[in-house]
Every structure is written in structure tokens, then in C-alpha cells.
Image (cartoon, helix red, strand yellow):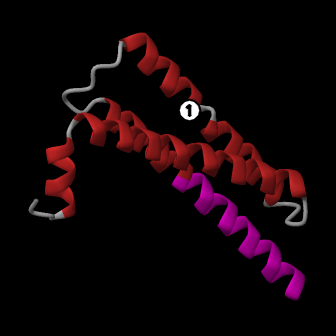
């Protein structure tokens, strides 16, 4: 009984991480399309390619983790994919904030 619950919980967690990775990847692409981005298209495509690698990593990690919750390789792939997504979103937001400091002030609600 306990083994079945553990397996089900690990499977749900793995697929939730996959959905988060996909959302982070989509966020990076959307931020790249915001007006005022001065990066050349070739560099944007390179960024998207690197970021999109996280989706297959997450899916393979989930496919490994669901049937075998104790497998460390599946967990490593999931954590690696999530790390790529978080780092790329942070990088894009920082680059956008440096280019448009007034927008960041409006988003954060600070007046000065």
C-alpha cells in the first residue's frame, strides 16, 4: 500500500515539474518577443534552442521517474531541466530590466 502511494506521488510530482518546465520555456520565448529587445534574431534562436532542450530532459526524467521512483537519473534530469528553465527566465528578465528600468518600476509598484 505504502509503495503504491509513493509511486503515485512521485509520478505526479514528475509530471508537475514537466508542466513547470514547459511554462518556463514559454515564458522565455514571450519575454524575447517583448518590444525593445535589441538582440539579433540568430542569438534569440540560439537562446530558444538552449531553453527548449529542457523540455525533452524533463519528459525523459518523468518517464524514468514514474515507473521507478527511486531512480536517481530521472530526478537528475528533472532537476536539470527545471534549473535551465529558471536560469533562462531570470536571465531574460534581468536583460529586459536593464534595458527598460521604468517598466520594472511600474511592475514592482515603486514610485521613485
Residue drawn at the location 81% of the way across and 58% of the way down:
65
Question: Observer-nearest residue: 98 or 53?
Answer: 98
Question: Observer-nearest residue: 56 or 106?
Answer: 106
Q: Position of residue 79 (x, y in %)?
A: 70, 54
Most extreme residue toward the bottom, as rendered? Answer: 1
| Magenta highlight on residue 25 | no
Of helix, strand and loop, which one carries label 1?
A: helix
State the image quarter where residue 91 is shown.
top left
Q: Residues within 10 Å of mark 1 (few under 14, many from 20)?
A: many
Q: Write down the residue under mark 1.
A: 52
Main secondary structure type of the part rendered in magenta: helix
Question: Observer-nearest residue: 83 or 68?
Answer: 83
Residue drawn at the location 27% of the way across and 26% of the way down:
37
Q: Position of residue 104 (x, y in %)?
A: 22, 50
Residue drawn at the location 80% of the way across and 52% of the way down:
76
Residue segment shown in magenta: 1-20
State the image quarter where residue 95 is shown.
top left
Q: Position of residue 32 (x, y in %)?
A: 34, 31
Amino acid at each position: 500500500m505504502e509503495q503504491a502511494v509513493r509511486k503515485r506521488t512521485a509520478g505526479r510530482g514528475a509530471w508537475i515539474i514537466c508542466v513547470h518546465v514547459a511554462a518556463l520555456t514559454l515564458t522565455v520565448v514571450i519575454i524575447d518577443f517583448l518590444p525593445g529587445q535589441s538582440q539579433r534574431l540568430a542569438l534569440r534562436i540560439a537562446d530558444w534552442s538552449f531553453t527548449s532542450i529542457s523540455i525533452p530532459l524533463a519528459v525523459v526524467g518523468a518517464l524514468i521517474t514514474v515507473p521507478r521512483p527511486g531512480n536517481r537519473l530521472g530526478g537528475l534530469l528533472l532537476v536539470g531541466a527545471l534549473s535551465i528553465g529558471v536560469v533562462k527566465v531570470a536571465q531574460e528578465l534581468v536583460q529586459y530590466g536593464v534595458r527598460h528600468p521604468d517598466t520594472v518600476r511600474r511592475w514592482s509598484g515603486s514610485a521613485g
